[in-house]
Image (spheres, rainbow, N blue to C red):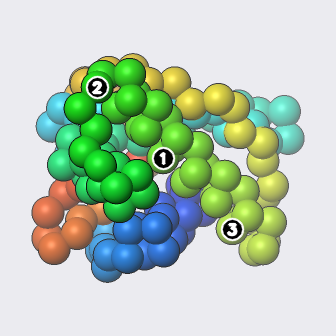
Amino acid sequence: MIDVLAKATENFITHQLRETSNKDKKNCLDEKHQSRIDLITSGTKKEAYFYYTHKFIQTVSEVMLGEETQDADALTDLINETTNMIAGSAKIVASESDASNFDIGIPTYDGVCEPKNDGTFYAFYINNELVLQIGVKD
């Protein structure tokens, strides 16, 4: 499941932000904006976690909305929408590959916090700067 989310994240960065990214499998324990979403497959529910740097979310806002996000409610909405877009893209990636199809829940913004330390993670970088990481709780 994590590899499907990683591919969807790469697609988001490439096609929505028009940036090139690289990734590695690690958990960076710095505080970031956290959003989570349930992934349901064959009756099993897993939680996927998305950790965004503030700078990354500002970039998403500028590219997709043409403005900086200043309001806390708008920031929360943008973080959850980004999570939903990546998870929705992961459903398409899964259906086009041999991966299991799954359903997604509604994203929940948890605020700024340290990433959880249980699960499998990918960290994504643009211009060698950490911008986001994703994880699926084991």
- Secondary structure beneath dot 3 equals helix
User: Tag 1 or tag 3, which sits nearer the N-term?
Assistant: 1
Q: Single out the mark in the foreground, 3 or 2.
A: 2
Residue in view at x 69 percent, y 68 percent: 93
Q: Which residue is mark 3?
A: 93
Crowd rating for badge 2 (residues with CA inside 10 Å; few <14, some 14–19, many 20+): few
Q: Which residue is mark 2?
A: 71
Cα distance between the residues tagged 3 and 1: 16 Å
Q: Which residue is mark 1?
A: 82
Report whether 69 appears left or right of 121: left
The amino acid type found where label 2 is placed reads: Asp
Give residue 122's quadrant in the image. bottom left
119 over 11 or under it: above or below: above
Report whether 16 appears left or right of 117: right
Residue 37 percent coordinates (x, y): 58, 33
Cα distance between the residues tagged 2 and 1: 16 Å
Residue 8 percent coordinates (x, y): 55, 64
Q: Single out the mark in the foreground, 3 or 1.
A: 1
Residue 109 percent coordinates (x, y): 44, 24
Residue in view at x 78 percent, y 42 percent: 103
Residue nearest the viewer, comparing 31 with 24: 31
The amino acid type found where label 1 is placed reads: Thr
